[in-house]
Amino acid sequence: MKLLIVAPKWPENSLWGQIYFRFPYLALTILAALTGKEWKISIIDENVDAIDFSDLPDLVAISIMTPLAKRGYEIADAFRGKGVSVVLGGIHPTMMNDEAKTHADSVVIGEAEETWPLVLSDFKRGNLQHFYKSANFCSLDKLAVPKRNLLNRKGYFFTNTVQTTRGCPFDCEFCSVTSFYGRTYRVRPVENVISEIGQMEKGFLFFVDDNIVGKPSYAKELFRALIPLKIKWFSQASLSVVKDRELLNLAQKSGCKGLFIGFESLSQENLRAMGKSTNRVSEYKDAIRILHDHGIGIQGSFIFGADHDDSSVFPDVIRFIEKTHIEAVLFSVLTPFPGTRIYKTLQRENRIIDTNWEKYDMNHVVFRPKKMTPEELQEGFNWAYRRLYGHRSILTRLFPFNRNSLFYGVQNYGFRQAWKKTLKNMS
């Protein structure tokens, strides 16, 4: 039997639809690994390859994030119109399962490890259920090794993505991670991680964990095991990494060349309201310096539109980024993703002004901020990106040049080109 696993394409007016240094969604290759040998499996990432709707599989599985919901539903409707059964899963169908069911034969809620084999078994027996939901969060002790051989590798900047943990110990009001994984933080046996890395191609490695240092004792064990491999890796981490010098030293020795850090705001009041009060604005500059002193580059994250933000936030953040030489930054408009606490709050306050899921890409304003108009927030966000990825700012942030400058220089150039295309498509 033929199974097609699909990731929908990002909208043209979204930054994520223009970025060329993309990497594959791990969920697709893990789902393939959970599928039995009696299935012929194909993976289509629409950002890389077009879907051939004339080549009909027996079953289609579509993984959907909120900004991809509209396109995901279009794909589902097209296949169902041709008599093909469709299963939807991912964060958006989990949070909006009744909505998703109107476009699917079945919806998988939450993680797929326990439910996917049952979905396939029921499908073969002609007894596909409307909804599937695991009774428990899955253990990572025997996590399936992704089937990377099914990917079109030419479409990605790199394919070496690995997961060592799931969840995050924090509970930020804007984040879907806790909504999807619950207040859990699960770790994978280090020997399994090392074994998987040994099966991969040489090159940079990206750990897709939401917070690789969420459990310091585990992170130290992992980093010690990575040292003999002599690899270079990137991941996401909380600023708490700088408070444990043993942990930070091990990260450096194990080959850490960059971390995605969620600074989110320069306002302590905003951070407190977001549920991220573990961040201390007064400690940001020292934390950045410490990471740089350890040869670790930073891709920062800042969110615009929180309740204490006014129009001064945009130049303030830009000045801070340039002064501290943060190598690369992703800006986000505060976005009320379904299932998050901020979604419930803004919905209760009647501040959500747009429910077009395509605009829930963190690049578009879909709510009324308190101290700005929606137009001011959108214009300020656009201005901040133009300024950040202008030549002058790039040179300011990457100077003085070091070993990481080449990588981040390429990344900055990629963001610059992607944002120029995005602005053109937004106009």
Image (spheres, grey):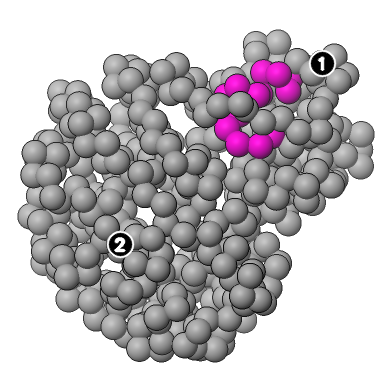
- The mark lying in front, picked from 1 and 2, is 2
Q: Which residue is mark 2?
A: 277
What label does residue 124 carry, if any?
A: 1
* Mark closer to the chain start, 1 or 2: 1
Amino acid type, label 2: Ser
State whether residue 319 appears in this view.
Answer: yes
Instruction: State whether residue 403 is above or below residue 282.
Output: above
Q: Give whichever of 228, 164 is nearer the camera.
A: 164
Q: Give whichever of 421, 320 is nearer the camera.
A: 320
Residue found at the very far top of the displayed protein: 38
Q: Is residue 109 magenta?
A: yes
Left or right: residue 177 versus residue 395 is right
Q: Mark 1 Cα within 10 Å, few/some/many (few <14, many 20+)? A: few
Instruction: State whether residue 23 is above or below residue 30.
Output: below
Q: Mark 2 Cα within 10 Å, few/some/many (few <14, many 20+)? A: some
The region drawn magenta spans 108-120
Marks 1 and 2: CB-CB under 8 Å?
Answer: no
Q: Position of residue 281 (x, y in %)?
A: 22, 69
Q: Tell me where residue 215 sits by quadrant.
A: top left
Tell me which residue sits at (46%, 59%) in the image.
173
Instruction: State whether residue 255 is above or below residue 195.
Output: below
What label does residue 147 carry, if any?
A: none
Tell me which residue sits at (28%, 72%) in the image.
268
Amino acid type, label 1: Lys
SS state under label 2:
loop
